[in-house]
Image: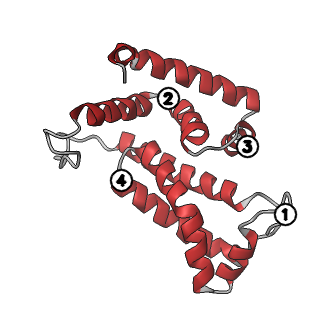
Amino acid sequence: MAAEGSDPDEALLTGVGRGDPAAVRQLLDRRLPRVLALARRMLNDAGEAEDVAQETFLRAWKQARSWRPGGAKFDTWLHRVALNLCYDRLRKRRDVAMAEPPEQVDTGPAPDAGLLGADLSRRVEAALAALPARQREAIVLCHHQGLGNIEAAALMSVSVEALESLLGRGRRALKASLADLAGQGR
């Protein structure tokens, strides 16, 4: 067990740096689901999220040998890398103007199954995607990734008070965007 205040991933990073396949698998098992969830919520695209997760872990493997214990927690660093890659992709989306929207396959449930749940989920995801980037980032880190305010604020390079302000504005915007759902008994 890791000592209090130490980074539980440091021993695994040492193993990854030595090329230990078991350490690679353990670190992936521990961190991949959260990185994928973060990227999916930020990008609203499963394929792009998988690409971001892959690039994030490629960077982690390259960094493993030179990782210095006692600095930033690995999980915090990994989130920052994933967020930066998401923002790079979001910037590229704005830069590419399409004549026609791409054709997309509906991967949701069959038309007669779970319509209300699927519609609700799409509405919430769309409302989240419509938030300004920093508000969306704060909501995703705190509510979906389960980070505390202090850690999320550090990841975003803002004060805790600024994070709380972003969270408040984001929550109000989501509430206003989804106000018509309040009477449906969810």
Image x and y of residue 121, in percent: 34, 35
Residue placed at 68% from the left, 30% from the top? 163
Q: Quadrant of the C terminus?
A: top left
Q: Nearer the viewer, residue 174 or 121?
A: 121
Give the SS element for disc 2: loop
The tag on residue 46 is 4
Give the SS element for disc 4: helix
Local packing at callout 1 (Cα closer than 10 Å; few below 14, some 14-19, many 20+) is few
What's the amino acid at mark 3? Ala
What's the amino acid at mark 2? Pro
The answer to whether marks 3 and 4 mark residues whose Cβ atoms lie closer than 8 Å is no
Local packing at callout 4 (Cα closer than 10 Å; few below 14, some 14-19, many 20+) is some
Q: Which residue matches tag 1?
A: 70
What's the amino acid at mark 1? Gly
Task: Give the CA separation, mark 4 to mark 2.
Answer: 20 Å
Q: Earlier in the sequence, mark 2 or mark 3?
A: 2
Q: Earlier in the sequence, mark 4 or mark 2?
A: 4
Q: Which label sits in the foreground, 1 or 2?
A: 1
Indicate left or right for 186 with 119 as reference.
Answer: right
What's the amino acid at mark 4? Ala
Q: Which residue matches tag 3?
A: 154
Task: Give the CA separation, mark 1 to mark 3.
Answer: 16 Å
